[in-house]
């Protein structure tokens, strides 16, 4: 049986930056057309949230950025993620990160950098991991 390699910090960061450019930037432009501001609006917030919740579910754990860099989100048993998993991963972690004024974001980054399994807080909450795809 072949060992599954978990994705580390830099590849995950790269995927997130690509998602921001490919999805986030167009959302900001659409929001600007409707509101006249480039600051966060319901259009950008809801658009990003829906993207992060729905796309990985219908696209087998990938976002556009993750697909480009060759990683995807899976359950700990290797199975496909569902909407419940993504709700836990995205919303619960987001609430925790917000409630701690970003302190847990730093803890999560350190976990991905220092732990052998490369899992962040949101991975533990949802029982997921990010793996390299062959």
Image: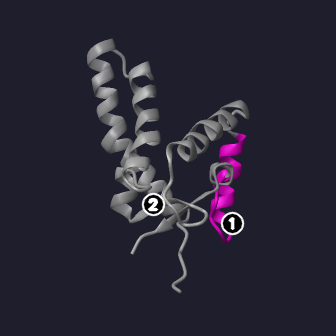
* Boundaries of the magenta span: 103-120
What is the magenta segment's predominant secondary structure?
Answer: helix
Distance from disc 2 to disc 1, alpha carbons, whole Å, reads 20 Å
Q: Is residue 113 left or right of residue 3?
A: right
SS assignment at label 1: helix
Residue holding disc 2: 72
Residue reaching furthest to the bottom: 1
Residue holding disc 1: 114
| Quadrant of the image occupied by residue 115 | bottom right
For marks 2 and 1, the one nearer the N-term is 2
| Quadrant of the image occupied by residue 76 | bottom right
**Place of residue 5 in the rendered image (x, y in percent of width and height, measured from the top left):** 53, 74
**Place of residue 40 in the rendered image (x, y in percent of width and height, measured from the top left):** 45, 23
2 up-or-down from 91: above or below: below
Q: Is residue 106 left or right of residue 61?
A: right
Q: Nearer the viewer, mark 2 or mark 1?
A: 2
Q: Which mark is residue 82?
A: none
């Amino acid at each position: 049986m072949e060992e599954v390699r978990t994705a580390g910090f830099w590849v995950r960061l790269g995927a997130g930056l690509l998602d921001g450019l490919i999805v986030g930037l167009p959302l900001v432009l659409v929001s600007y057309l409707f509101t006249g501001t480039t600051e966060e609006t319901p259009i950008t917030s809801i658009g990003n949230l829906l993207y992060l919740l729905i796309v990985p579910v219908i696209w087998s754990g990938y976002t556009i950025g993750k697909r480009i860099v060759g990683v995807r989100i899976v359950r700990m048993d290797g199975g496909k993620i569902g909407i419940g998993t993504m709700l836990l991963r995205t919303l619960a972690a987001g609430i925790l990160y917000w409630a701690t004024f970003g302190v847990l974001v730093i803890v999560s980054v350190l976990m991905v950098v220092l732990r052998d399994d490369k899992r962040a807080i949101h991975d533990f909450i949802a029982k997921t991991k990010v793996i390299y795809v062959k």
